[in-house]
Image: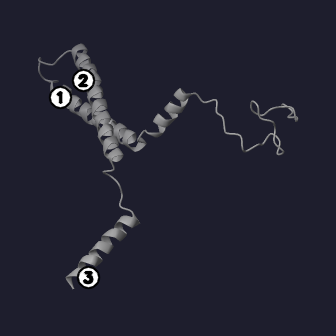
Amino acid sequence: MAIVTESTPVSPNRPISERGHRDHDIPNSSIVTPAEDMRTMMLHSVSWGAVFAGAAFALVSQVILNMIGLGIGLSTVDPAGNGTPTAGSLSTGAGIWFVVSGILASAAGGYLAHLIHRAVASGAFRVAGARDRASVSTRVEQDCLVGV
């Protein structure tokens, strides 16, 4: 730990004040680069509610699409007949369907998250506050008084 003396400058061309090294008049300096600061601002501009809603929608969509694929795959199996596909072709089709349904579900979840974020950012989901309710009730009272 450095010892602060009268000759130790706190900032360039500025001597230590009477309060010592805890001079509150010195502007705060930061070693944060502008790129790190921009990442922090972008992190706070993310609508996390929209992200979680999109992720939940993607998971539910994935389950639904997999159930549809399971139903289609099992409908091709005929236990009594000879037209049943081989295990290799059935598993290949199931794998392809799993990948395609995952991509579709992720795209749908991302699109929903985008729509929710855009609606929240534009103020479409703004909750009316007490001031808004007060102005509405004042207008109603004024309209009633004018009609008298």
Between label 2 and label 1, give the one nearer the viewer. 2
Q: Residue at x 16, y 28 (%)?
A: 75
- Tell me: 51 left or right of 27: left
For mark 1, what is the residue? 72
| Disc 1 secondary structure class | helix
Pointer 2 residue:
97
Q: Which label's residue is closer to the chain start, 2 or 1? A: 1
- Picture coordinates of residue 69 (x, y %)? 22, 29
**Colouring:** one colour
- Seen at 31% across and 45% down, the residue is 119
Out of 72 and 123, give the one closest to the viewer.
123
Circles 2, 1 touching at the beta carbon (< 8 Å): yes
Q: Label 2 is placed on what type of residue?
A: Trp
Q: 106 or 10: nearer the eye?
A: 10
**Cα distance between the residues tagged 2 and 1:** 10 Å
Q: CA distance from mark 3 to mark 2?
A: 67 Å
How much space separates mark 1 and mark 3, taking CA atoms? 68 Å
Residue 121 rendering spot, x and y as whole percentages: 35, 45
Image position of 123 (left or right of 147): right
| Residue at mark 3 | 145
Residue at the spot x=30%, y=51% of the render? 124
